[in-house]
Amino acid sequence: MNPYYKDYQEYLAEIFPGEKIQKISVNAGFSCPNRDGTIGTGGCIYCDNTSFTPSYCFEGDSVKIQLEKGKIFFSRKYPQMRYLSYFQSFTNTFRGTSVRKGTVEELKSLYQAALGVEQVAGLIIGSRPDCFSEELIAMLVKLNQQSPVFVEIGAESSHDSTLATINRGHDWKTVEMVVRQLAEAGIRTGLHLIMGLPGEKESDMLETVDRSCGLPIDSVKFHHLQVIAGTRLSELVRNGQLRVEPWDVDDYLKFCCRIVERVPKHIAIERFLASAPPAKVESPRWGLKNYEFTAKLHKLLASTNVKDK
């Protein structure tokens, strides 16, 4: 057991005791309201979905086939493993006008297709805080009675000025509202936060951590900001229109220690690091995999005597 914080494996072990659980990412052809004109165009300035989505997710396969491919890959190591279908790419509670205007029943059919695959134990649904309705949440409640449902909300920052700068298209109040709605409905909810967004000081980021932990969330995922080639952020930085403070890996490790001190033990920390393909990353270029960074962090936490909460 991790003595410093509840990690994601410990969190999953509470829900699936005695089982090996692995995520498999799927791309179900979702859109994003911040891309297709529903609320905006161009998307978030840092976003490149191909930088974090496995290549097999862009081959046009059905949800079932993508999951079967993922099972083949992971079962070589753990034949008895069960899986969580991770609806990761774009906004997975939003069908969108660029695909077709969907209904809750269409979403339900996609989620059920995943749950119908052998050895799939539950769903993780990545989305935005402004893409939920009472009808949708009621549908998720029914699915959650069948198999565990986890919702991952992209919040990124608690500061509205930052959200405007990155062209996020929603405010923090919307995050607070939907997290509380999901918690009241009994849906396990996590937040995705980005550290190092343009214009934010460490005090701003820590305020976001505190505000997030004050909500009824079950988990949180931290990413450091990466400037990805071909994104609007890359262009703005190159043209001098925005400045991104470069993280030194040692400074970010120290900052993550401060995060750990603030996150209550009942909230699981899934990760601290973004991990886009190195060829796409313009900065910072640390050359560290997630497990390597985590090992360094645990060593630093031990040396700084961070107490178990």
Image (tube, grey):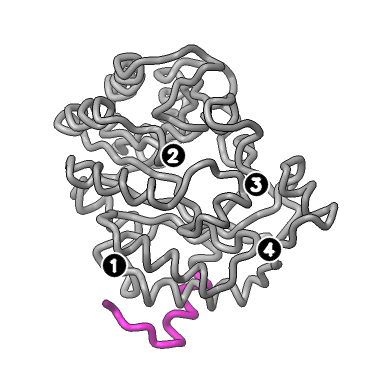
Q: Nearer the viewer, mark 2 or mark 4?
A: 2
Q: CA distance from mark 4 to mark 3?
A: 18 Å
Mark 3 vs 1, N-terminal side: 1
Q: Identify residue type, mark 2.
A: Arg
Mark 2 vs 4, N-terminal side: 2
SS type, badge 3? loop
Q: Residue furthest top?
A: 100
In screen coordinates, is 23 left or right of 36? left
Q: CA distance from mark 2 to mark 4?
A: 29 Å
- Depicted 293 relative to depicted 257: above or below: above
Q: Which residue is mark 1?
A: 1
Answer few, some or many: residues within 10 Å of disc 2's Cα (few below 14, many 20 plus, some between 14 and 19): many
Q: Nearer the viewer, mark 3 or mark 1?
A: 3
Which residue is depicted at the point 38% across and 68% down? 210
Q: Nearer the viewer, mark 4 or mark 1?
A: 4
Mark number for residue 128?
2
Q: Is there a contact, CB below 8 Å, between mark 4 and mark 3? A: no
Mark 4 vs 1, N-terminal side: 1
